[in-house]
Amino acid sequence: MSPETQLDIVFRVFVALCLGATIGIEREYRGHAAGVRTLAMVSVGSCIFAAVGVFAFPGHVTDPTRVAAQVVTGVGFLGAGAIFRAEDGVKGLTTAATVWVVAALGMAVGFGLYIIAATAAVIVLVGLVLVRPLEIRFLRPPNHPMRRRDDEPPDIPA
C-alpha cells in the first residue's frame, strides 16, 4: 500500500474521530453512558474496517459491503449491551441507536463519503438536541407510564 493511500486512511480516521467525538460530547453533556471516548472509538473502528475493506487488497476484487455488514453486526452487540430493562420500562434505546448511527458515520468516512457523513452528523445532533424538548412538550403526558423520572417537563407558560 502506497504512503499516499496510508495518509488518506489516516485522514479518514481523523475525520471519523472528530465526528464521533462531537456526537459523544453531546451524549456526555447530557450524562448518558456512551460518551466521547466510546462514540469516538466506535466511529474510528468502523472507519478503519471500511477503509481496510476498500484499500487493503489492491488489484483484488473485494466487496467492501461485506465488511460493512460485519461492522453492523458487531455494533449491534455493543448497542444491545446499552439497553436494559428497569422497573419503570426500557432504558438505553437512544444510546444504542446513537452507537449504531456513529458506526454508520465512521463507515461513511471510511468509504470516503465525507459530505454525507458530515451532513448526517449534523442531522443526528439536531435530532439528539432538539427532538427531546419537542417530545416532552407535545407527545408525552406528564403521567405517562414510560416517562423516566428525570424527564420533567420544562417550565413553559401556558
Image (tube, rainbow, N blue to C red):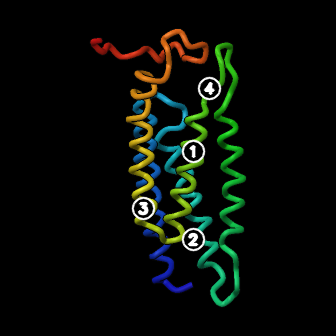
Three-letter code, disc 2: Ala
Looking at this view, is 155 or 43 the one in front? 155
Residue 98 picture quarter: top right
Q: Secondary structure at mark 4?
A: strand
Percent position (x, y) of residue 157? 27, 12
Q: Earlier in the sequence, mark 3 or mark 2?
A: 3
User: Does the CB distance between marks 1 and 4 fall below 8 Å?
Assistant: no
Q: Nearer the viewer, residue 154 or 50?
A: 154
Residue occupied by mark 3: 15
Q: Give the quarter of the image for residue 57.
A: bottom right
* N-terminal label among 1 and 4: 4
Q: Residue 54 sits in which quadrant?
A: bottom right
- Residue sitting at 41 percent across and 54 percent down? 18
Q: Is residue 67 above or below residue 132?
A: below
* Percent of width and height locating residue 34: 54, 37
Q: Earlier in the sequence, mark 3 or mark 1?
A: 3
Q: On the image, numbered disc 4 is attached to which residue? A: 91
Tell which circle, 3 or 4, labels the residue nearer the N-terminal end: 3
- Describe the element under mark 3 as helix, strand or loop: helix
**Badge 2 local density, few (<14 within 10 Å), some, or many (20+)?**
many
Answer left or right for 24 relative to 90. Answer: left
Q: Amino acid at mark 4?
A: Lys
Write the residue at 49% across / 38% down.
Answer: 35
Q: Which residue is mark 1?
A: 99
Q: Quadrant of the N terminus?
A: bottom right
| Residue name at image x 41 percent, y 15 percent | 153
Q: Are marks 2 and 4 in contact (CB under 8 Å)?
A: no
- Seen in the image, is 133 located left or right of residue 147? left
- At x 67%, y 18%, the residue is 86
Question: Residue 132 appears at what percent x and percent y?
Answer: 44, 29
* Label 1 Cα crowd, 10 Å radius (few <14 / some 14-19 / many 20+): many
Q: Is residue 109 left or right of residue 155?
A: right
